[in-house]
Amino acid sequence: FAPDSVHNDGAPRGRAPGAGAAQAKAGFAANLQAWIRRGEAWNRNSLVGGGLTSLFDQAVVSGTNFLAVVVVGRFAGSEELGLYTLGLSVLLLAMGVQAGEHVAIWATNVPEWIWLQFATARIGAVLVTVNPAYRGHELAYALEQSDARVLFLIDRFKTSNYFELLAAACPELGSATPGELEADAFRQLRWVV
């Protein structure tokens, strides 16, 4: 997250008004379209067209950087949201996540939650939300039932250290190679981010 990229009023920071901003928007639109083409060329069957993500892409490419996310004093414009969600979509595909597979998130209200929601929708994956107040045994149950391939998490919430709780629920995590986690209790889980 780049906290200095958008003012509270949604105006991009670090850009002079006028022609410079127009050029930046045009450059963003070209970059986004190039990334979409790369993603489609890389794996046409994994990108789901239409729906909410298509409408969002059209809004982002239109060149109007509107305030899209306000979460706990953090702000993100539509351009930033578009780039992060597209980047996460490509990351998920590179991790082997396919349409219909489950991706879990164990986090509070953070902008990354929204980015992941759009990214999973873009590739047709299912976002599984894990209650931030869960303790270790509840997390274990949620992961067992969800068949999540990837778990995204924050480090802590209130007094809960998520890394410690996850390590207790999944002792294999400490010795696993990224992308090759094989946990007895969580058959599908391969990645923890």
Image: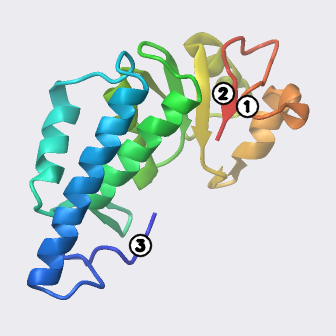
- Quarter of the figure with residue 77: bottom left
In this view of the protein, can residue 109 be seen by the observer? no
Which of disc 2 and disc 3 is earlier in sequence?
A: 3
The disc placed on residue 139 is 2
> Residue at image x 73%, y 25%?
137
In the rendered image, the vertical position of residue 7 relative to residue 44, given as above or below: below
Q: Nearer the viewer, residue 34 or 98?
A: 34
**In the image, 143: left or right of 172?**
left
At label 1, the amino acid type is Gly
Callouts 2 and 1 close, C-beta under 8 Å:
yes
Q: Which residue is mark 3?
A: 3
Closer to the eye: label 3 or 2 = 3
> Residue at image x 20%, y 55%?
29
Callouts 3 and 2 close, C-beta under 8 Å:
no
Residue 184 lies, in percent from the top left, at: 82, 12
SS under mark 1: helix
At label 2, the amino acid type is Leu
Q: Quadrant of the C terminus?
A: top right
Closer to the eye: label 3 or 1 = 3
In the rendered image, the vertical position of residue 89 relative to residue 45, given as above or below: below
Residue 73 lies, in percent from the top left, at: 36, 69
SS under mark 2: helix
Q: Which residue is mark 1?
A: 136
Callouts 3 and 1 close, C-beta under 8 Å:
no
- Quarter of the figure with residue 191: top right
The disc placed on residue 74 is none
> Residue at image x 66%, y 25%?
138
**In the image, 40: left or right of 105?**
left
In the rendered image, the vertical position of residue 119 relative to residue 28, given as above or below: above
In this view of the protein, can residue 28 be seen by the observer? yes
Check disc 2: other Cα within 10 Å, few if <14, some if 14-19, many if 20+.
many
